Image (tube, helix red, strand yellow):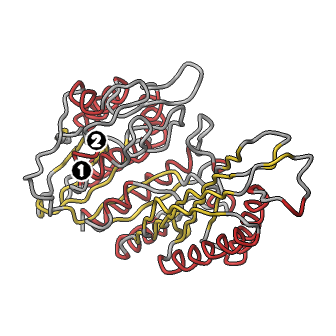
């Protein structure tokens, strides 16, 4: 099996589905291109001898039965949807890598002792409808029907109508959650530049960072820019600037793996000759340790209150996302490490700062992730790219990992 040739052919094939003439990939949940991609993957699974089928919501599974322990399943895969105008690797590389790794194992070693299964998850990105992880949340039976009954996309098309148009429906909530999954391994591009900067081929992910996201509003007093003396102002931008400066300096003192981002800033009235009386801004904070994350954000919340008081500003702090860190399974992490060593790959243990389907699956089934480098750390962008050699290295490590889990 010429892995480099086959991998490139499969990436090119799937990337033609949803690829815009101007560049970039757009393949959104329950769209025509999404359905075409899932059906193409189904054909590829069947072509290598796997039985393939969809669940109720559109997750696709390909399966080969184990010869000795068929009731024990080793699962690998990722999501098939993309962001709007995204790249050709985020999500779909994990699907392609999973079935090519299994194809290689079947051709080289025959049938496994434990069942091997590929999952091509329906949706992870949340790019069409205001819902995320629809595929993995249904797989582990966390998805709630009531959360999507009334939602629609940017064109007004309702979620439920588009789902049914593609031939899918809500899952049967009376079914029990699967109990045969002994391991889930997801391979993904890093979407950062750590591996590239350190000249490594493989990241062995041992933790997915927790996230806290805030919307904060500072309220002062809008006033004339020419007639209001500096000492009499209640300038919301001045207050925000001090908050931003002090908080980021504190984050730099704490250091990795903590990250802090002020990503959106909206001053009002946002005009040249008026002292801004209000600023709305967001804050995103992430860490792999839940205690450290809570401690730091509590410190920053107190700091914001103190600075607002000093400037004579009112402040409203809304914490609207609070996701705990998700550790990966230590046994599978160790198995991936050994696979990287056996394949003579340069690797490191690392955490994921981005969210992935694995964080949804890990609380239910033993889970770990493999990263491959991203050129310049770019993702969710038509320029998203990884060297073919690094993609091949990832498939080899995945195949070696699945061999340890399913053949021994």
How packed mark 2 is, by other alpha carbons closer than 10 Å (few <14, some 14-19, many 20 or more), is some
- The circle on residue 144 is 1
Residue at image coords 38%, 76%: 330
Locate residue 23, reporting x and y percent: 58, 25
Above or below, comparing residue 45 to residue 303 in the picture? above
Residue 49, located in which quarter of the rendered image?
top left
Residue at image coords 75%, 42%: 270
Instruction: Give the quarter of the figure containing the N terminus.
Output: top left
Is residue 52 in view?
Answer: no
How packed mark 1 is, by other alpha carbons closer than 10 Å (few <14, some 14-19, many 20 or more), is some
Residue at image coords 42%, 31%: 27
Give the residue at the far top of this rendering.
21
Is residue 77 in view?
Answer: yes
Locate residue 54, reporting x and y percent: 19, 38
Locate residue 389, reporting x and y percent: 56, 48
**Horizontally, is 343 left or right of 72 in the view?**
right
Q: Nearer the viewer, residue 322 or 77?
A: 322
Provide the residue designation for mark 2.
148
**Horizontally, is 100 left or right of 232 in the view?**
left
Residue at image coords 47%, 30%: 26
Residue 192, located in which quarter of the rendered image?
bottom right
Q: Nearer the viewer, residue 297 or 370?
A: 297
Q: Nearer the viewer, residue 156 or 132?
A: 156
Instruction: Give the quarter of the figure containing the C terminus.
Output: bottom left
Locate residue 222, reporting x and y percent: 76, 49
- The circle on residue 77 is none
- Secondary structure beneath disc 1? loop
Marks 1 and 2 in Cβ contact (< 8 Å): yes
Above or below, comparing residue 394 to residue 207 in the picture? above
Number of numbered callouts drawn: 2
Give the residue at the far left of this rendering.
174
Q: Nearer the viewer, residue 366 or 288?
A: 288
């Amino acid at each position: 099996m010429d892995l480099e040739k086959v991998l490139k052919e499969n990436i090119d094939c799937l990337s033609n589905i949803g690829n815009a003439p101007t560049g970039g990939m757009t393949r959104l949940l329950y769209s025509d291109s999404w359905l075409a991609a899932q059906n193409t993957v189904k054909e590829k699974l069947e072509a290598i001898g796997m039985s393939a089928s969809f669940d109720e919501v559109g997750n696709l599974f390909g399966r080969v039965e184990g010869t000795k322990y068929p009731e024990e399943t080793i699962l690998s895969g990722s999501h098939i949807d993309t962001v709007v105008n995204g790249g050709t690797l985020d999500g779909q590389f994990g699907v392609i890598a999973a079935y090519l790794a299994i194809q290689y194992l079947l051709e080289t070693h025959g049938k496994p002792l434990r069942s091997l299964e590929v999952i091509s998850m329906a949706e992870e990105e949340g790019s069409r409808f205001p819902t995320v992880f629809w595929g993995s949340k249904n797989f582990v039976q966390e998805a709630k029907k009531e959360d999507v009954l009334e939602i629609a996309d940017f064109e007004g098309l309702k979620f439920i109508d588009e789902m049914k148009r593609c031939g899918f429906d809500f899952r049967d909530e009376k079914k029990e959650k699967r109990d045969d999954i002994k391991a889930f391994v997801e391979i993904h591009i890093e979407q950062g530049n750590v591996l590239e900067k350190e000249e490594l081929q493989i990241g062995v992910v041992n933790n997915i960072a927790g996230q806290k996201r805030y919307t904060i509003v500072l309220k002062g007093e809008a006033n004339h820019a020419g007639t209001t003396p500096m000492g009499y102002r209640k300038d919301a931008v001045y207050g925000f600037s001090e908050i931003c400066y002090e908080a980021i300096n504190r984050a730099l003192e704490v250091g990795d793996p903590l990250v802090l981002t002020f990503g959106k800033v909206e001053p009002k009235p946002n005009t040249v000759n008026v002292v801004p009386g209000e600023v709305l801004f967001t804050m995103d904070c992430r860490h792999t340790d839940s205690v450290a994350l809570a401690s730091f954000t509590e410190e920053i919340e107190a700091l914001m209150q103190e600075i607002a008081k000093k400037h004579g500003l009112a402040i409203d702090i809304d914490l609207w996302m609070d996701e705990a860190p998700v550790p990966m399974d230590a046994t599978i992490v160790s198995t991936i490490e050994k696979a990287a060593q056996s394949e003579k790959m340069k690797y490191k243990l690392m955490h994921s700062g981005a969210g992935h389907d694995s964080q949804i699956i890990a609380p239910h089934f033993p889970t770990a992730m493999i990263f491959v480098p991203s050129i310049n750390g770019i993702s969710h962008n038509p320029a998203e790219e990884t060297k073919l050699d690094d993609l091949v290295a990832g498939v080899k490590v995945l195949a070696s990992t699945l061999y340890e889990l399913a053949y021994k």
